[in-house]
Image: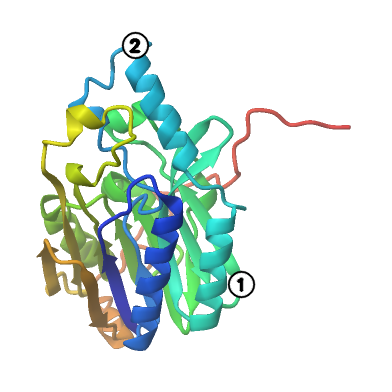
Amino acid sequence: MRIAAAQARCPWLDPAAGTAKVLDFLNDAAGQGVELVAFPETFLSGYPFWVERTDGARFDDPDQKRAYAAYLDAAVELGGPELAQITEAVRDLGVFTYLGISERSGGTVYCTLVAISPEEGVVSAHRKLVPTFEERLVWGSGDGHGLRAHSFRGVRVGGLNCWENWMPLARQALYAQGVDLHISVWPGSTALTRDITRFIAREGRVWSLAAGALFSYADVPADFPLYDRLKELGPRADGGSAIAGPDGEWVVEPVAGEERLVIADLDLAAVRGERQNFDPAGHYSRPDVLQLQVDRRRRATAHFTD
């Protein structure tokens, strides 16, 4: 299988332009024979880059309220027109797609990784289990509903958002479902992907693909409430998309600064060979001693019976 990370500059808080860019990259991927592609964390409609640079933790601050409102307005819904359009393109092009979105649900935004199958449409929507540090000021905490592996053309694949890739039990939840390919999505940083991408490949004896975005504070639209405090700050995310083989060695080292598809050809025989001496969910596990229980129910604040 030919796989790719779509390392692209995010049209920040512009879901229409973001959707168009996703479609462009899908068409490019299909034209290069790519069968599975991953887009960065919250690529549609953007990572909350403003929080760390504008005193985002100040309680009841009117500027932060306006910034969050703008971010909420730009977020997309699982049943919305943006994902419907992308799902149709995935079906037409035959490219299995992992897409990071800022998901709007009521008044809350979730960092969500959507898996879209050409045959079945949206097959999972994984909300990030624990937003990292200042992200908790913007995103809600997710649940286990999206901790699912999917089969596509003989390959088992699963994915996680950013720092939850460092959560051992989240990784094990995917290993236990027999993944051959692990997808990690990031806001964009070679520093973030350099260690964990290879570590996951080596630990899970899997192919490991990291997808990161490009972003500069110059990309912030002029009507964003905190634009004047951000416009002079310069670059923030440098990409970092990379691919490692199941022996933990680089196939493509982290790519910085380039907007392009990062492509490799996946060979399942390499996975089988590396599992000869280590399989974390098989012959090198001890379920009689150590067990993992995963609750995959979607959490809701209320249940109504009429």
Query: Which quarter of the rendering shows the N terminus?
Result: bottom left
Which residue, given by chain and number where applicable, does mark 1 sit on? 120
Q: In the visual, does 15 lie left or right of 220?
A: right
Image coordinates of residue 250 in percent, x first then y, are: 12, 72
For the point 47% across and 43% down, the residue is 75
Image coordinates of residue 50 in percent, x first then y, are: 25, 32
Image coordinates of residue 160 in percent, x first then y, are: 36, 54
Looking at the image, residue 87 lies above or below residue 105 = below
Task: Please tell me which residue lies in front, 267 or 209.
Answer: 209
Q: In the visual, does 100 lie left or right of 168?
A: right
For the point 38% across and 44% down, the residue is 13
Among all residues in the image, which is located at the extreme front?
222
Q: Residues within 10 Å of mark 1 (few under 14, many from 20)?
A: few
Which amino acid lies under the numbered mark 2 shown in the image of this protein?
A: Phe
Instruction: Identify the image quadrant of residue 35.
Output: bottom left
Q: In the visual, does 277 lie left or right of 149?
A: left
Query: Which quarter of the rendering shows the C terminus?
Result: top right
Mark drawn on residue 59: 2
The tag earlier along the polypeptide, 1 or 2, is 2
